[in-house]
Every structure is written in C-alpha cells, then in structure tokens.
Image (spheres, grey):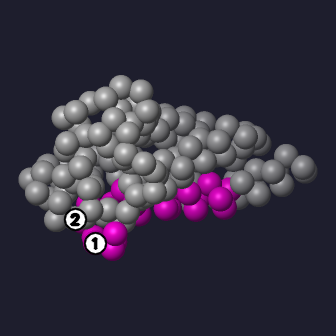
Amino acid sequence: MMRYEVVNSLELPLLALQAFQIVFLWIHDWVPLGRLNDVSAVRSQDTRRRLVIVTLIQSVPYTIGFVFSALSFGKRYPHWLDLWLWISYGLLFAGQLRAWWVPYLLRPEPERAARYRRMFGNTHTFLPPHNGLVPNTAHILLHIATAATLILLWIKPNA
C-alpha cells in the first residue's frame, strides 16, 4: 500500500509540471507575457511558417505525454508511456542544456549569443551575462520544470 501512496503523491505534481511545460511551449512565442517574453523580437528572427513548425515540433510530443498521463491518473502508467515521458523530457532537457547552459557556462557561441540577444534581450533576467548571453527568466522556469519532471520520473515507483 505504501508504494501506491508514493505513486499517488507524485502523480499530481508530475501532471502539473507537464501542464506548465506544454502551456509554455505552445504559447511563449505567440502570446505576450509581459517582460517574460518578447513576441515581436522572436518574430523578427523567424518566419511565421518556421515558428508554426517549431511550435508543433516542440509542443506535440509533450502534449501527447500529458494527455496519456492524465488518462492514466490513479493507475499504473503503461510501459510505453514511461518510455515516452523519459525520452521526450530527456531530449527536451538535453536541448535546453545545449541551447542555453553550455554556451552560457562553458563554450561561447557568438552567433547564438547575438541571436538570443535580439530575441530575448528585452526580457526579464536575473543572472549576470556570461559568454555574451544570459538565460532569461521564462526559459529558466521551463528548465527547472523540465529538471523537476525528470526527477519525479526517476523517483516515481513503477507500481
């Protein structure tokens, strides 16, 4: 019985993290969120067609995972869903590390830094600039949510 209680206690936070991430991924390039994003700056760097494609690629897999997680709420996740969540959020986190944290902390990428300054230079940040760029607050919140999702997947028993 203890095993089910642990699974049950992690289900709601896991679902909430997934919901936050899919909402973020669907809207952050389209809906103005005050100083958290700069929709016009993003649109100045990418065509509408490219933004639609990127939004679909970065949002649909996580939406599928969320829907099936919600449908499995209170039950054991099917093995394929555990794999889906691990693979999709693992890839998302690897992409976040590669796109933001490697250039910020380890290896300067002047072209990426210049592009990010154009796209995110007017958004809220709290970290100091380093290697020509600074992760903005909205992306840091997404990265924390992704890391937390992976941690919950790690500690969630497969009951």
Q: Is residue 57 above or below residue 111?
A: below
Looking at the rendered structure, the secondary structure element under dot 1 is: loop
**94 or 112: nearer the viewer:** 112
Residue with the most extreme top position = 107
Q: Is residue 31 left or right of residue 17?
A: left
What kind of secondary structure does the magenta stretch mostly adopt? helix
Q: Residue at x 25, y 40 (%)?
A: 113
Question: Magenta stretch containing residue 13, yes or no?
Answer: yes
Give the residue pinned by disc 2.
39
Which quadrant of the view contains residue 27? bottom left
Which residue is at 85% across, 46% downward? 3
Mark 2 surroundings within 10 Å by alpha-carbon count, few (fewer than 14), some (14 through 19), many (20 or more): some
**Label whose residue precedes the other's in the sequence (2 or 1):** 1
Amino acid type of disc 1? Pro
Q: Is residue 66 magenta?
A: no
Residue 115 or residue 153, whichever sits in front: 115
Give the residue at mark 1.
32
Q: Is residue 71 visible?
A: no
Please rate how many residues cluster around mark 1, counting C-alpha atoms within 10 Å: few if below 14, some from 14 to 19, many from 20: few
Please name the residue shown 49% across and 35% down the image: 90
Q: What is the three-letter code of the residue carrying label 2?
A: Val
Give residue 99's position: percent from left, percent from top: 34, 37
Q: Can the viewer see residue 29 in this picture?
A: yes
